[in-house]
Amino acid sequence: MEKNYNKHIPKILDFKEGGIFLALFLLCLGLSLATSSFLTSYNIGILGRQITFVALVALGQTLVLLTAGIDLSVGAVAGLCGILGAKLMVSTNIDPYICTLIAMGIGICVGLINGFFIAKIGLNAFIVTLAIGEICAGINLVITRGYPINKIPDSFKHLGRGMIGLFPVPVVILLIITTILILILRNTPYGRNIYAIGGNEQASRLVGIRVVAIKMSVYAIAGMLSALAGMIFVSRMNSGQPTIGPSWLMPSVTAAIIGGTSLSGGEGTVFGTILGAIFMGVLANGIVLLDISPYWEKVIIGSVVVIAVLIDHLRKRNRL
Amino acid sequence: MICRQSIINKRMNNKMNNIILEAKNIYKDFPGVQALTDVSIDLRQGEVHAIVGENGAGKSTLMNIIFGLIKADKGEVFRNKIKVDINSPIIAQELGIGIVPQELNLVPLFSVKENIFLGMAPSKMNRLVVDWKTMTKKTKDILAQIGEDIDPQKILYKLTTAQKQLVQIARALAFGAEILIFDEPTASLTLKEAKELFDKIERFKSQGGSVFYISHNLEEILKISDRVTVLRDGKKIKTLNTKELNKQEMIKYMVGSKIEEATKQLSYNYKDKAVVLKVENLSRKNEFHNISFELYNEEILGIAGLVGAGRTELVRCIFGDARPDSGFIYINSNNIYLKSPGDAIRNKIAYLPEERRSMGIFPQLSVKENMSMPILNKLIQLFFINRKKEEEYIQEYINKLNIKTPNLNQLIKNLSGGNQQKAILGRWLLTKCKILLLDEPTRGIDVKAKAEIHNLLKILTKQGVSIIYISSELQEVIDISDRILVLHEGKFKGEIKSSCADQRKILEIALS
């Protein structure tokens, strides 16, 4: 925690996630005052489920961003793995949850392919993941020809639509994964190494960090989490939708950015990304509740991202 | 607002030795650090005014304030006795102040003339079109003024470091600088290039220019400066005429007390000493050729050579960061094939790289995190890092190395260069290495920290560590090493015991 020398900045902003936390708090406050339908358990439930998808994908994206990389294939991977998992459980007798694991395995494989070209060969992450993403989207269309996959087994309902106690299952899964990632990033050598690579890749090599292996692993994790998100969505919709996925890509990056992750690597936290994803979700939710035309959504979200990055930049400058 | 042009015109009335720039009672505070306290300094017409001090003494901060990169908290600056507010480098340039920074500010892919006139290209048709002809002519004129013959069309990255520096100087002159601020200009120059630089500075002086010269090289300062100002811990200690000074006295003012430079220990005794590292016929295309040598247990082996001799590339191969094309490396008589730095570290080899900023530090992480990187695996308990143990280990070395930091969670980028270097050295000491490869370890570090590091290295050898010490400062190599290898342009030129060595002999060997 850096010491706050500027008396104009309140103490809460001393924490890395303080800014986004404050913004989220104010947003929720504003919305709950503006409309009575915000703070209802029904709305919160919806919010929880909706945010989970982007959040899961954003977590994987955060790890990749921390190593100074980027993964533009996460949306397409989520879509493709969802389709593959759905196809598998519909056409065979394999238990749907095993199919989910298989889909996640496919996600890991795509991630490893990304990682191979980026970390081992040395190609540009933007281009590689963009291309791989396109390939995945293409394979998705080849398989589905644009039609959804129906007749999902009933036993699969629980994943996307069930509850564990007070919480929807997807939220519980998100919480567990978030906790694991926070623990790993903060307290393990692997986590430190990720920050090191993003901060100074050459120096990382010179202290014996296995840069190639670690970089490949973060893309693999991103692929896995995207696949999981895709499968949870299949369960929620009770069908394999060929169109989902791409709409999760930009939010995954923006959630990480407004949560404090730096595009140049080495800085950012999982908690910040979660707050960022919640913020984006609440914002979209608010637009609906306040009856604002959905066409304005892009304008509003874009503006929010610019403001958030600007505030973060000013905050960093004042520290010096 | 007084017209800046009229301020410059005042120089017409200046006789030699008038004060053309003065900073009075400057205060500057950074978070947690009082960088400058009540510092006053002045510059006389036609003088070379050197500024010395330990890392963190405030030299760069003071110059950055004069050049408009930083704003002082309190204090005033006067140019030709008129008060000015230097709020940005542009204003500084308009006032005739130019800077030649330590890290050159040029665009490698542009030509010499484009670099000189970056941002102020001469133009035709009312600023619509660049006037290349005028640019080329003016470039030739300025280069002639400095007395250097570089082709204005040549692309910058093809020039030597010394030539690039001259382009940087030319750029300042193109802006109309009468005052040049040099920040450690000879850090990456050879002796010959440094001498040429001094000639150029003399030339500048004779044309009416004046110079602020920041340097750690005390011998250099004694040679070329007229006055010296010593800063210590953000305060000005003294300004003296160089004629009245010697090296010991300068150090005394810089440090506040005389340092005991480690007394030369008794000659290293080679009898019965084991060979810990042996390099046989090592070659790497375009870098070094057919190098063979041995490193004995507990010795300090210096590798001397002029810049570009292939020493860094050689050491990188020993550390597994680069693969040699041919040859063998033996560690304790075992032929080892090092595939990566990880392999080397497992073999108890450590490497302190030349450029700490690009190859050493993780700027966004804390001192603690920077230092513990290679030994994290030794600090884990059930997959998680044992923070208490980590802090204990790190604190031990912060104390041992006398690293100045408020606490170990301080971001490393907030430390001064010398303390950053000590932290990186501490990182490697934590690995309990047996072979330590040091590449220019005291470059850009103040005298006190340098002596501390040298003393520490001598203690380390007594504890069983063998050291390879690369430095371009010949006197330093002679002082610290037991034996010296001389490399030149990638080839082994000779070996000499340090007790018999002096700078001239080493150069003779190198250039033979």
Image (spheres, grey):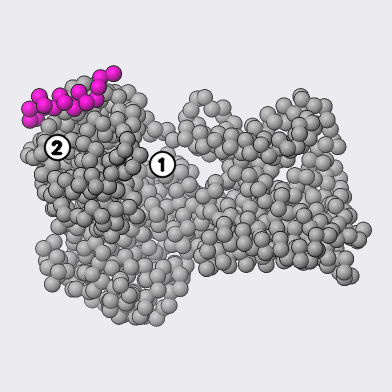
Q: Neighbour class for label 2 at 10 Å: few (<14), some, many (≥20)?
A: many
Q: Position of residue A306 (x, y in %)?
A: 58, 37
**Left or right for B451, reference A270:** left
Graded by Cα atoms within 10 Å as few (under 14), some (14 to 19) or many (20 or more), the crowding at tag 1 reads some
- Answer whether residue B6 is magenta in the image: yes
Quadrant where the C terminus of chain B sits is bottom left
Residue B83 vertical placement versus A309 (above, below)? above
The stretch of residues the image draws in magenta is B1-18
Q: Which residue is mark 2?
A: B209
Residue that appears at 33% across and 28% down: B87
Is residue A195 highlighted in magenta? no
> Mark 1 or mark 2: which is in front?
2
Chain that bears disc 2:
B
Q: Position of residue B34 (x, y in %)?
A: 35, 31
Residues tagged by mark 1 and mark 2 found on one chain of the structure: yes
The quarter of the picture where residue A104 lies is bottom right
Identify residue type, mark 1. Answer: Asn
Q: Residue at x 15, y 66 (%)?
A: B506
Q: Which residue carries the number 1 mark?
A: B414
Q: Extreme front residue here?
A: B125
How far across and how far down the image is residue B422, in percent?
36, 51
Q: Amino acid at mark 2?
A: Gly
Q: Nearer the viewer, residue A112 or B295?
A: A112
Q: First in sequence: mark 1 or mark 2?
A: 2
Q: Secondary structure at mark 1?
A: helix
Q: Is residue A231 above or below residue B230?
A: below
Place of residue B101 in the rendered image (x, y in percent of width and height, measured from the top left): 28, 44
Total count of labels: 2
- The image shows residue B268, relative to residue B67, as above or below, that is below
The residue lying toward the viewer, choosing from B297 and B21, is: B21
The picture quadrant where one finds residue A234 is bottom right
